[in-house]
Amino acid sequence: MRATRRDLIRLGALAAAGSALPTLAWGAGPGAAAKPLRILILGGTGFTGPFQVNYALARGHKVTLFNRGKRPSPEWPGEVEQLHGDRNTGDLKALEGRQWDVAIDNPTSLPFWVRDAGRVLKGNIGHYLFISTISVYADGSKPGIDEGAPLAQYKGKDPMAETIERLRADIENLYGPLKALSEAEAHTQFGDKVTIVRPGYIVGPRDETDRFTYWPHRVAQGGEMLVPGDGKDPVQFIDGRDLGEWMIRLAEAGTTGTFNAVGPRDTVTMDAMLAGCEAVVGGDPRYTHVTPEFVEAQKIDLPIWVPRQAGPFAGYGQVSNARAVAAGLTYRPLATTVAELMAWFRSLPGERQAKLNAGITREQEAEWLRLWHASRG
């Protein structure tokens, strides 16, 4: 099955593998920033938020989190202020009468969340950074999508009336357009003091979607392995730590504008990604490439990969990151991401490791490989 906007949010290589740290090192980080900031993070306990917090503390910033308090926070390597409320119900009282240098908005997909935040924070923050998505683009079929490409259009009646329930029920049609409208609302509320960051697949330790994890996990199992396409399709993903830490550096520099936060820095093909995984995890797999037409006909749901030749999302593996790189986005080696991702994944309970949230089962793979070989005579 070809990747869709739903696949991007459901739940966004170099074979020369250097040495990699086996675990997450909370508290390890760079030196102090030139000027300490008061940073408000809306969310902060999901996937990338903790990486932002950890890096900000290591840089000497003061961090405040605002969320519902439903998810346990990690043990931070420094003091973190925690405020609670619920943006879905408009409860932002804890933010009233407070001031911060920067606000980073991680979880928002609804325009009214940005509007309500603006009503409380306007005049009380100096810089607003919003995590959006490459799903905002109206046409994902062409390579080289840059930040000036047309955005998806909302076709409903009232975007401010859209709810989480409606979004979840119609992600395919609402996610990109509502994110685009949320970006526009950010500028309405905060003017030109806005940074929009548009990632694709976000991967690495703490990734509960398993979209990238499927590949090194499967490579490590070895044996004959079904690989979609001819191995030359470009793939894009970004380590959540690279994204989170860069957000803090953007805040420090006061950088505004819109950026595609996709990686790696240079083009990596499907085969290169798998070679990079194998260099870290071993497994001695035997790759069997099947055509995009076979994948489509059999409705094989494999994450990260999109066929480059054709389709409404053929450009999702070739989005331009030139502007982000020029603004200081850097990337960990694939070897580091794979090694630390797998160290984290293998620390999870056995039942969690046994059932991935993305990809196909070995039984499904074996049947599709049988059909593929039969079709080739």
Image (cartoon, rainbow, N blue to C red):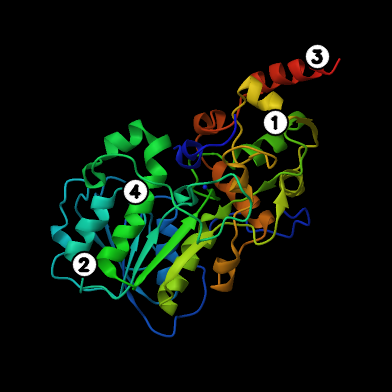
Instruction: Find residue 243 and report its horizontal and vertical position in percent.
Output: 50, 60
Label number found at residue 292:
1
Q: Nearer the viewer, residue 23 or 207?
A: 207
Give the farthest residue toward the right.
377
Q: Comparing marks 1 and 4, which lies closer to the viewer?
A: 1
Query: CA gap, disc 4 to disc 2?
Result: 18 Å
Would residue 194 appear left or right of 28 to someone viewing this image?
left
Residue 197 in view of the camera: yes
**Of callouts 3 and 2, which one flags the residue occurring earlier in the amino acid sequence?**
2
Query: CA gap, disc 3 to disc 2?
Result: 62 Å
Would residue 155 appear left or right of 318 to someone viewing this image?
left
Where is residue 314, by image quadrant?
top right
Marks 4 and 2 close (CB-CB < 8 Å): no
Q: Secondary structure at mark 1?
A: helix
Residue 26 in view of the camera: no
Amino acid at circle 1: Pro
The residue that appears at 53% across and 59% down in the rendered structure is 261
**Of callouts 4 and 2, which one flags the residue occurring earlier in the amino acid sequence?**
4
**Of callouts 1 and 2, which one flags the residue occurring earlier in the amino acid sequence?**
2
Q: Nearer the viewer, residue 54 or 295?
A: 295
Label number found at residue 243:
none
Instruction: Find residue 20 and report its horizontal and vertical position in percent.
Output: 67, 58
Label number found at residue 374:
3
Give the farthest residue toward the bottom.
34
Query: CA gap, disc 3 to disc 4?
Result: 45 Å
Where is residue 53, by image quadrant?
bottom left
Residue, disc 2: 121
Residue, disc 4: 109
| The C terminus, quarter of image | top right
